[in-house]
Image (cartoon, rainbow, N blue to C red):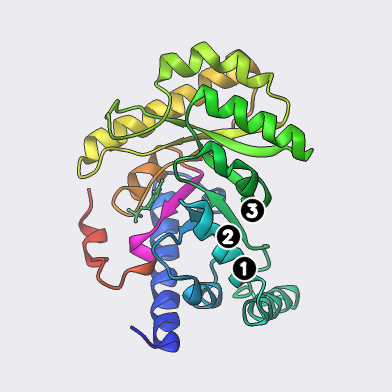
Amino acid sequence: MGNNEEYTAFLQARRCELMRYIAQVAGAAGRNPQDITLCAVSKTLPAEKLPCALRAGYRVFGENRVQVLQEKLDMLRTPACQSICAATSNAAAAGNPAGACAPVSFDMIGTLQKNKLNKLIGAARRIQSLADVDMARALNERCAVHNVRMHVLLELNISGEASKSGFSVPELMEHMSGFTELSHLVIDGLMCMAPAHARDEARACFKELTRVQARLRADYNLSCSVLSCGMSDDFDIAIQEGSTLIRLGRILFDPQYDIQSLTQRS
Ligand SMILES: *Cc1c(COP(=O)(O)O)cnc(C)c1O
């Protein structure tokens, strides 16, 4: 799919199919599909293909490396991308539901590095992957210097897998009151990644995320309204368990991803 028009057509068709499926899964779970935001994980999408993704209608992106996030922002500022965004927002203003009018933004979803926080603060709309106490303090300090408040999600490692970053639930509870005092961070909610290829474990993981949210609401008077969970292989389960932000990569951007198997998921 070297050809941009062809790739845009693929992305558009895939997006339509997925939006329909998301609405169906949400409806069956008694949820409003409008309450579920799709974050397009563009980490494997080369910057020069960003216009294709914008044409297909994506506006909320997730990246896992600061450098690449900046490259995508540079691409976004080019006339080619700006005219796509302007055309779709004009269409939306004129009442064409196909026109997306939301501004384009990039969330950071990957491991943070202290020496890249300054760059990240200027580039990301939100950090979904705040995963340790030390980093939370460092980020708060950096934001204070820049005089900004950064929206963050606290990443939980619910499954306890050593390969995953994030707070354990007891650790989060222990440090939570400290986090609420970090005045340059706005805690929007929680994020987690479920174990791969294990649908029952994924469900248990998402259920736990919802339970933690309920505890934070009760104990800290935080709304913590964003639950970022669900990836290509398990977003249907995440929607059933209350996700408000699904992070999809391969299923959106990879023509080889087998979407037929969606309907066979149980
Ligand atoms: C890559 C990535 C995703 C998307 O995963 P897919 O399986 O490609 O949908 C979601 N979240 C995080 C944190 C990622 O690194």
- Residue at horizontal 33 percent and vertical 61 percent from the top: 250
Residue bearing the label numbered 1? 74
Name the residue beneath numbered marker 3: 123
> What type is the residue that disc 2 sits on?
Gln
What's the residue at 73%, 26% (across, down)? Answer: 183
**Apparent side of residue 183 relative to residue 25 in the rendered image (left or right):** right
33 in relation to 151, above or below: below
Residue 159, magenta (yes or no): no
Under mark 3, the amino acid is: Ala
Q: Is residue 27 left or right of residue 203?
A: right
Question: Are there few (<14), some (14-19), or many (20+) residues within 10 Å of tag 3?
Answer: some
Q: Which residue is mark 2?
A: 70
Q: Evaluate if marks 2 and 1 touch, with contact meaning CB atoms under 8 Å apart.
A: yes
Query: Tag 2, which secondary structure?
Result: helix
Q: Which residues are magenta?
A: 244-252
Query: Where residue 133 appears, x then y in whole percent?
Result: 52, 22
